[in-house]
Amino acid sequence: MTGLRALFLLVPLCIAAQSSAAPQRQQPRPEIFTDLLKCRTIPVDAERLACFDRQVGAMDAAAQRDEVVVLDKGELNKTRKTLFGFSFPKLPFLGGGDDKEEAPEQEGITHIQTVIASVRSLGYGKWQIGLEDGAQWITTEAMTARDPKVGQTIELKRAAMGSFMGKVDGGRAVRMKRIS
C-alpha cells in the first residue's frame, strides 16, 4: 500500500517539474526581422552599416508590398476595438494565445462605448444597430424600455460564455450579437 501512496505523490511532482522546465512559447518572428537583428552582431562598422541599410531596404519593400505590417500599441488597440464582438482564434498580437498571465491592458478589449450611427427595427422589440465604426449589431432579446435612436451612446460589454450585453444611454442591458 505504501508503494501505491508513493506513486500518487510522485506523479504530481513529475508533472510539476516537467511543466516548470518547459520553455516559454514565444511568437516566431518573421525572417526579414531576424535578418535585420543579426546586423547588430557584425563587429566592423562599415559592414554593420551596410547590413542595416540592406535589411531596412528589404523591410521597407516588404511593407510596401503589404507582406509585413508594423503596428504601434495605439494602432493595435484601435484594431482590437474595431474587431470587438467577433470570434477569432486567440492570436498573440491581438491579445490572446499565450498561456502565461498577461497584464490587464493586454488581455483584450472587454467593453467599448460608442455612438449609434443607424437603427432598424427587426420587430418584436429587437433592433439592428449600426455603430460609428461601421460595425453592425443586433439585439437577441427585446428592448422594452425605450427604442434606440441615432446619436445615443451605446456600451457593449463581454458577458458569460462568449455573449455580449449592450446598454443604450445607460438603460437596461440586453444581449446582443455582432453580425458585421
Image: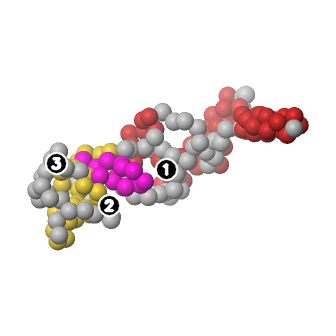
Q: Nearer the viewer, residue 69 or 101?
A: 101
x 72%, y 38%: residue: 19
Q: Which residue is mark 3?
A: 171
Q: Which image quadrant: the N terminus?
A: top right
Query: Looking at the image, which is closer to me, 11 or 140?
Result: 11
Q: Nearer the viewer, residue 97 or 55?
A: 97
Report x, y in % for residue 17. 76, 34
Which residue was labeled with disc 2?
A: 177
Closer to the chain start, of discs 2 and 1, is: 1
Q: Which stretch did the figure color magenta?
A: 155-165
Q: Callout 2: helix, strand or loop?
A: strand
* Apparent side of residue 117 relative to residue 34 in the rendered image (left or right): left
Residue under circle 1? 69
Q: Is residue 123 left or right of residue 9?
A: left
Residue at far bottom of view: 123
What residue appears at the point 17 percent right and 70 percent down from the top-left corner?
124
> Disc 2 versus disc 1: distance between alpha carbons?
30 Å
